[in-house]
Image (spheres, rainbow, N blue to C red):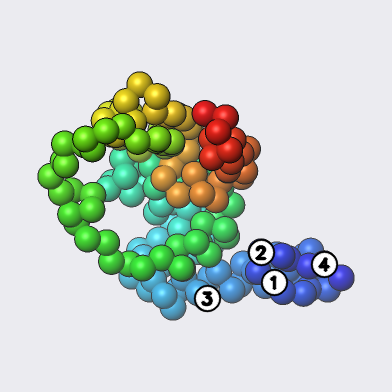
Amino acid sequence: MFRVELLRADYASQEEAAQKIQAGLNAFYQSKYGDIWSRHSNDVQTAGQALADILYSSPAFGGQGGLSAARSNVSDVRVVAQLLDTYDRWWPGAASQGAATGGPHGRLPVLAFASGNMGPAWTEQVHSGAKQFGGDKATIIDLPLHGHIDLLVGRLAAEDVFEPTRRWLMGGR
């Protein structure tokens, strides 16, 4: 018996799991994102590939893997798809485009990760914001090959993000 923990499903073999997961992804994305599917299904073989391409080429995130570099195998597109399915599709513009606050009156402990695929302007914004709130003691980790989502679900997220976060929280700043 081959068990896929991520999807919590039992399959007779790894081949059956791969076949059914791919069929499920295709059906899921075709029904949920029909407009995207129709634009990309003739250009790529599967919904997973279409999703990876869309996330990589999103102009709102720099167009070079800024949202996710699953297309470059930094993340497993199936894990990215599951994460995106949990997201609320609404985000207040003021949270990302509002006026700067000027920072706190004192300094705060700050741990920041900059996803480099979003481009140099984003990386500078992360550095600037972290220093504004944390001063010279802000801890900033640059991950040049990562998109925004890859920080959470990338293949090396445990090593590149979660472990440094654990050490930072435990006082090993």
> Residue 8, how many percent across, how many down?
69, 71
Q: Secondary structure at mark 1?
A: loop
Q: Residue furthest bottom?
A: 31
Q: Residue at x 47, y 38 (%)?
A: 146
Please name the amino acid that badge 2 sits on: Leu
Q: Is residue 55 above or below residue 2?
A: above
Look at the numbered disc 4 and give the secondary structure of its residue.
strand
Q: Percent x, y for residue 102?
A: 16, 36
Element assignment for label 2: loop
- Which label sits in the foreground, 3 or 4? 4
Q: Quarter of the image holding residue 106?
A: top left
Quadrant (top left, top right, bottom left, bottom right) of the N terminus: bottom right
Q: Residues within 10 Å of mark 1 (few under 14, many from 20)?
A: few
Q: Which mark is residue 6?
A: 2
Q: First in sequence: mark 1 or mark 4?
A: 4
Percent coordinates x, y for residue 60 in the rendering:
27, 48
Instruction: Measure how far apart labels 4 and 2 are at the Cα level.
Output: 12 Å
Residue at the extreme front: 106
155 lies above or below 38: above
| Tag nearer the camera, 3 or 1 | 1
Which residue is disc 4 drawn over?
A: 2
Kindly identify which numbered label has been placed on residue 27: 3
Kind of residue indicated by mark 4? Phe
Instruction: Give the labeled residue for mark 1.
Output: 8
Q: Residue furthest left?
A: 99
Question: Which residue is rendered at x = 38% and y = 73% of the image?
Answer: 34
